[in-house]
Image: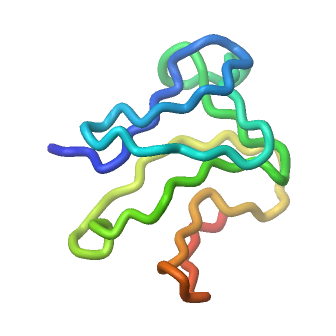
Amino acid sequence: MSFELLIHSDTTNGDGTFTDSSPNNRTINKIGSPVHSTAQAKFGASCIDLTAITTALTIPSLPEWGSRDWTIDFWVYRTTSVNAYAFSEKDGDSTATSAIRL
């Protein structure tokens, strides 16, 4: 099994560093102030806290995702019933967007 992107959250509370642990070592950009949190950790010491409405992690285009099957795996702890997007993908420079809505 190979990973195109692998973000672990097994660190200290409040840490704002996000690293791709896959062999690709992709750049992970932050929008707002996402952090690792120990409050709702499910696997490992912490989880990724994206509770602020303007908080997100972004990864530059991954062209290989469009050429084969792939899987997204994550655990979500919801604190509100308001609709939210857990994953959103935009196709290059087009306006076409796909999303997983929770």
Q: Position of residue 51 (x, y in %)?
A: 79, 42
Q: Position of residue 28 (x, y in %)?
A: 53, 44
Q: Position of residue 48 (x, y in %)?
A: 63, 33
96 w.r.t. 77: above or below: below
Q: Quadrant of the C terminus?
A: bottom right
Q: How many marks?
A: 0
Residue sitting nearer the eye, 14 or 23: 23
Would you identify the image quadrant in which residue 11 lies? top right
Q: How is the image coloured?
A: rainbow
Q: Quadrant of the N terminus?
A: top left
Q: Residue at x 62, y 48 (%)?
A: 57
Answer left or right for 19 relative to 51: left
59 w.r.t. 34: above or below: below
Q: Residue at x 66, y 25 (%)?
A: 36
Residue sitting nearer the eye, 17 or 49: 17
Q: Residue at x 84, y 60 (%)?
A: 82
Q: Position of residue 45 (x, y in %)?
A: 55, 13
5 w.r.t. 20: above or below: below
Q: Residue at x 44, y 65 (%)?
A: 61
